[in-house]
Amino acid sequence: MLKHIVMWRFVDGAEGKSKEEHALWMKEHLEALVGVVPQIRTLEVGINCCPSETSYDAVLISTFDNKEAMEQYKVHPAHVAVSEYCKKVRESRVDIDYII
């Protein structure tokens, strides 16, 4: 199994929304991928409740059978649509993938 973790910082005011609205949008739309993208084994989105100078606004924690399954998820049209929105509203993004 492969664990895929992504964190984002959003731009306040991008696309006319606050950072909090972007985080909520991402949570709603990423969680909606479960059952749509067959490669997803588990998926959880958390929104930071304790903002600080060093924190990120939201986190995605997901699992896949292997790297190939994760790569298929990344190009699935439903995921690509979420990713395109995110690219417009994020300040930064970090990720890590590891075998569990």
Image (tube, rainbow, N blue to C red):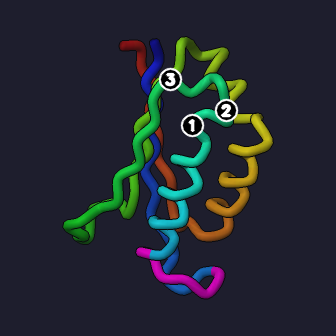
Q: Which mark is residue 34?
A: 1
Q: Which mark is residue 76?
A: none
The residue sitting at 60% across, 81% down in the picture is 14
Quadrant in the picture for residue 85: bottom right
Q: Which mark is residue 41?
A: 3
x, y percentage for residue 29? 58, 55
Q: Which residue does the numbered mark 2 point to in the structure image? A: 37
Mark closer to the chain start, 1 or 3: 1
In-front residue for pair 11/59: 59
Task: Please identify the dominant SS of the magenta region.
Answer: helix
Q: CA distance from mark 2 to mark 1?
A: 6 Å
Q: Residue furthest front?
A: 35
Q: Residue furthest right?
A: 77
Establish if 21 lies above or below 70: below
- Please rate how many residues cluster around mark 3, counting C-alpha atoms within 10 Å: few if below 14, some from 14 to 19, many from 20: some
> Could you tell me which residue is drawn at 46 percent across and 36 percent down?
43
Q: Splitting the image into 4 quarters, where does residue 67 fall? A: top right
Hey, what amino acid is under mark 3? Arg
Kindly identify the amino acid type of the residue bearing the numbered disc 1. Val
Q: Secondary structure at mark 2?
A: loop
CB-based contact (under 8 Å), mark 3 and mark 2? no
Please rate how many residues cluster around mark 2, counting C-alpha atoms within 10 Å: few if below 14, some from 14 to 19, many from 20.
Answer: some
Number of numbered discs visible in the structure rendering: 3
